[in-house]
Amino acid sequence: MFSEFFFKEVGTALKRPMIYIFFFIVALLVFFAVISDNVVIGGTVGNVYKNAPTVVATFVAILTIFGLLFATAFFNNAALRDHKYGFNEILFSAPINKSGYFFGRFMGAWLLSTLVMTGVYFAVTLGSIMGPAFGWIGAERIGPIPIQSYISTYFIFVLPNMFIAGAIIFALATQFKNTIISFVGTLLIIIGYIASGSLLSDIDNEFIAALSDVFGIRAYTLDIKYFTPLERNTIAPSFSGYILWNRLLWMGVGTVILIASYFSFSFANKNKKVKKEKKSKDSSINQMLTKPDISLSNSGNTWAHFSSFFRISFLSIFKSNVFIILLLFSVILLVVGLLGGFEYFGLQSYPVTYKLIDEIGGISTLLIIIVIVFFSGELVWRDRDSHINEVVDGTPHHSAVSLFAKTLSLIAIASIMHLFLIGISMIYQALNGYTNFEIGVYLTSFFYEGLLFYAIWAGLMIFVQVLVNQKYIGYFVSIMVIFALDIILLILKIESNMLSIGSTPSIRYSDMNGFGPGVLGMQWFSIYWLLLAVVGILFAGLIWPRGTNNLLKNRFTTGKKTLGKSYTGALGFFSIAWLAVAAFVYYNTQILNPYKTSKQQELMQVDYEKRYKQYENITLPKIIDATYYIDIFPNKRDAYLKADLVLKNKSNEAIKELHFTVDKDLKHEISIPNASLDSFDEELGYQIYTLQQPMQPSDSIAITVKATQETKGFENRRPNTNVIKNGTFFNNLSVLPTMGYAKNYEIGDKNKRRKYDLPERERMPELQETCSQLCMTNYLTDGAADWVNVETYISTSDDQIAIAPGSLISEKTENGRRQYHYKVDHPSQNFYSFISADYEVATRKWNGVDLEVYYHEGHEYNIERMLDAIQKSLEYYTTNFGPYYHKQARIIEFPRYSNFAQAFPGTMPYSESFGFIINLEGENKNNVIDAVIAHEMAHQYWAHQVIGAEMQGSTMLSESFAEYSSLMVMKQETDAMQMKDFLKYDMNRYLRGRSSEVDEEQPLHKVENQTHIHYGKGSIILYALQDYIGEEKVNNALKGFLAEYAYEEPPYPTSNDFMRYLEPQVPDSLKYLIDDWFKDITLYDLRMDEATFSKTGDGYTAKVEVIANKNKVDGEGNVSDVSISDWIDIGFYSDRAAENLMFNERVYIDKSPAIFEFQLDSIPAKAAIDPYRLLIDRVSKDNTKTVSEE
Amino acid sequence: MKLTISNLCKTYPNGVKALDNVNLELSNGMFGLLGPNGAGKSSLMRTLATLQEADSGSAILGDIDILNEPKKVRATLGYLPQEFGVYPKISASQLLDHLAILKGVRNKGERKDLVNYLLQKVNLTDHKDKSVKGFSGGMKQRVGIAQALIGDPKLIIVDEPTAGLDPGERNRFHNLLAEVGEEVIVILSTHIVDDVRELCNNMAIMNLGKIVFNGQPEDALQELNGQVWRKTIDRSEKEVYKTNYNVISDKMVAGKPQIHILSNTNPGDGFVEVPPNLEDVFFTKIH
């Protein structure tokens, strides 16, 4: 009996197209993900093969989410087929056995659902073979076909996920016998998955997040998060780690649900609720009505028709279950998102309006598009589906009127959803005590990013449905128009928004700069698309299948008959208007503001490198003195810059030529006295000037450079955000021409380089023992300058403050312009910013230094704390490192188009999106805001006083030291446990970062500007070092190093030079740390294996057995064991939460396992090895163990 | 008011001739259109209701060219299609209100009175605020009838209106139609012969796209007078009779087949002469 039902279920499905369509969709997605870099599922990076076992697992895991929709169809079918066709009564009266029927059907649907997912394996195999064979992808990107991963992922993800989801859907289907409820079940499962994701945003909840995820995706992600590329390429998933627990849990849940639904399932028909139909009362009771006189109007009914169509269409959507489900779904998504808050390194951001707008935007674009696509089909087909089309078509209305009304009802529905989400957002703000309700901002954002968008899509989707005139094919075409078209454009490398339906330049709200420079372009593009949508509907009105005319030709002839003059006129008018706007948009985006597609950009980069790489090492003079004249016109978004530069030949040879790479967009003009422009590659911007008189060593010349940034019309993309209405912010490197060959123009991605036959890019020069010519340039300014005197004359509109580096010499307002004159107090790095915005200023004087915070009105929350942070940093640094040479330390807020803080001499621009709006109320502990400020302040020493040579290890001297300095500032006010809490982010950053390493990993002293090493690992190691050898010793090393190199002319120092200062500070017993931590990649595997205590005398004796292994890893990730002979902390917590460390001792461990005994005063709750997490250990949770009584 | 249909032809893309040179002239009053399924009745009705294009021919209603001035026809048309469905979650009065607006009843008060009046006419006053989707087939059909009467149409076309109605509803419907049918043209398409007999002064019978009879029911009956004979036979004999006589119909009466044959002379053999009814006319014409 079982096998009959089972094989029937499978056999029937295999004869139908559905399963093949699903299989095809899955396979197609995966195939492109394998052979192309443009399609990404789950993301693969760097050295990981496109078909690596872990990548296959990610494909499978992520596609099971989509697979769920397919599975719903199979399970729902299996459960409801007999009911749907009214066959149940016949079937269930036959002598069939319940278990055979129930499980036969279930297992059949289960197998079918998993068959669809095998499309992944099919596609990976095919892609692995075809990709390299046809040259779509480099052979080195493809590993061996991961058969093992196929098998393991099938059993780990596919079978269990389909089982769990299937059990739920099958239970719902047999219980409620309603397809909609089954799909709601599916939605709930997906919501559950998303909800568990919000738990993951706080890394302390890892285990819960791993367990709570129905699909096991996050469990797996967590399991492999610290995998190196090598491990990712070789290790297939297995039932272990989080995955094991997750699978056990959910398979159990699935089994329980299945068994429960089996026992509640019965063949007998559920008593159908029979609605009692009221006997219609004899209407003779009522007074007989007489036929009323009515007046009919034959013309001018358009508006009445329109509003009636609108009302009836709107109501039918508004009352539909699907709408209600989707509305609830979007609300749940928003609420789940908001419940997580706006967390940032353990702090909460104020719920400022733009954060909520972003949150709404993420939900609305996806869900509302689904609503529009779905209901466009419903509305267009509603009359026919309800069999009322002939009646409606037989009334004297114009088809276009009904279509416009339907479109408007879609727009209204979408708007209601959007406004509803806004309402919830405002409630959320209110509940969080944030009362600055910016209703205007919400509404403007709704208008720009919601309404216009919905109107465009509603019109176009209605048009598509009418044109196609087949509901489901219509849906297919709609989805194609939304997604496939963009993929095609991507493949064809076309980037014009004019061809990507509904696309406009992006806008982004910033408290400082409003909706920003993209608005104008967005508006014009919106008009362009809206007009197209109107033309589309007018045309749809013409070909509307009125009556029973289904052939397009007939529809057209029928439509033409109702064409009045006004209709033709309207069609003509809107078509011409659309063409006119199209021409205007084209003129603005292609002619006035031409742009390079990324493909063209790439080709230029290739050309540039091939032609001019030869000049990379020519000798050029260096800037020693710079005077800037800058005029900023914020309202016009224009800026004009002139720079007088003094160049000096610091080399030993004569210089005959000056080379520059200029930027066409900035209209660079260079004038050099007594020189001729010998060669100018207009396209690539390479210029070579020959000097009439060669510059002899130590000679100087003065040159002038001009740059112009002018805004004309609007662009295809959001224009650059350097010069804007409020919050202009640019640095000198971005506006001046590059001297000589600009190495940073080279294509960095190694796969792209291979594609264009470029040699592998040279890595950063190797760290050298004795420094040669390489030490003559630093890594920041690329040889263009050493220390420069900078003076700036900068003007802006009279409502703004303009800021340049150095002390303010003078300020005046003239003719509506504010003019400032700044001058640096000490020659500085040739790296500084120019800023203009409408600022509030907070100041404080400290030891002759002006501490200043320039901030946007309304962002005053943390200003005092920021001043405190600057002051604390300066106090620590001047005491421990050396003098501060500037007379000011400025923090300057800039709009959120970027999200960073950066240090320039004496100034630190700091993005509005963090720091300024983080809620620090009641935060007495260290926090990331203070930390970032301390970090940037530290850069005033580490980068702006001493800077490493252009060589491996140099960023350790700036970034790692800045991190260390910042940690030391924080450490003054907090205890070690809180520091550990803070350092976990660094540990995570390093371990995660190394798992997606693009090139081979380097040890700290040879770091090649990789952030996870110089920030993440650098923090941990330097922090641990001061814990091992003492803060003062580390500071002594830094102080000595700084004293030797601060503001010194080249040669610049290398990390070896710092090691010279560090080594004497390290006691012999700990000398091994220098190799282990700085010169090698060392990982520890520490475990608390056994921990017991017993009462002895007055106190307690605790006995622990620890495992301590030390591994060295080479650049590729190969691990080798080395013998342990290290000093490691062992500690005891008095509480189970492991927060209160009651005892800690650093012990010498030279074997593993090793046993230790400690005398304690009170009963320990937990024992830990390395309780402060000073050592890099990939698995930390086994470091702690509950202590049991012997 | 006159409706003149001349040489109307329509061939579907699959080659089926739905209308084959149809000529009819109708004036005020009820006009019955009889025909078996697939005869082309619905095609004719749809064409008159401006829902379908004809290949050739013309149809003139008063001074309106139906085939080329659809908008004018629609303004004066009441149409109840064979399949009348309703929107989900929309009540009877909402639906009628919507259709009244579409037909040009702009005044809100008038519309309300009209809707109430029509609902009472079709005996749905008690259900006017309920979703029509939950109505029984008969109730839905009554809503359909009500909507066809909105706006005093000059031409009312009803396609199979009484299918699904119980006898009481059917009577009420007939009365309603007869009431309005005095002043306007009502075309009643049906395959229920009794409907025509009870209501229509004029009728046509269609088969395979052609008009096979057009005239008054009495004329049709007259034609067959004295030619229809009836006999109750055994089931096994059916084939024999079919080969020997011109059998125009057979139906079961009290469990036994009763056949009608057409014969100019007395066939004997136990046949008795019966006065012809419209059913006999119908079957004679379409065979």
Image (spheres, coloured by chain):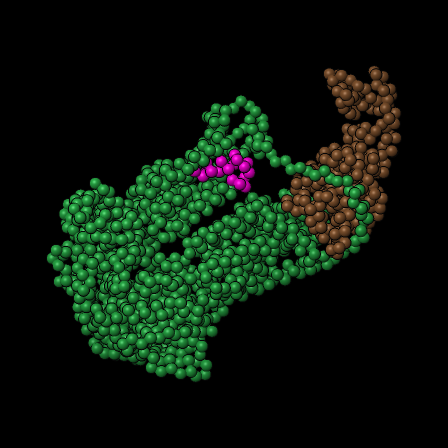
Chain colours: A green, B brown
Total numbered labels: 0
Query: In this rendering, would A1039 be left or right of A737?
Result: left
Q: Quadrant of residue B197?
A: top right
Task: Looking at the picture, tell me which residue is in the foreground, B24 or A1187.
Answer: A1187
Q: Quadrant of residue A695?
A: bottom left
Q: Main secondary structure of the magenta part?
A: helix
x, y (%) of residue A206?
A: 34, 48
**Residue visible at 28% across and 50% down in the picture:** A1135
Above or below residue B111? Residue A473 is above
x, y (%) of residue A478?
A: 54, 49
Above or below residue A355? Residue B254 is above
Query: In this rendering, would A686 be left or right of A1176?
Result: right
Magenta segment, which residues? A163-182
x, y (%) of residue A328?
A: 52, 49
Quarter placement of the C terminus of chain A: top left
**Residue visible at 14% across and 60% down in the picture:** A1066
Task: Looking at the picture, tell me which residue is in the foreground, A407 or B94.
Answer: B94
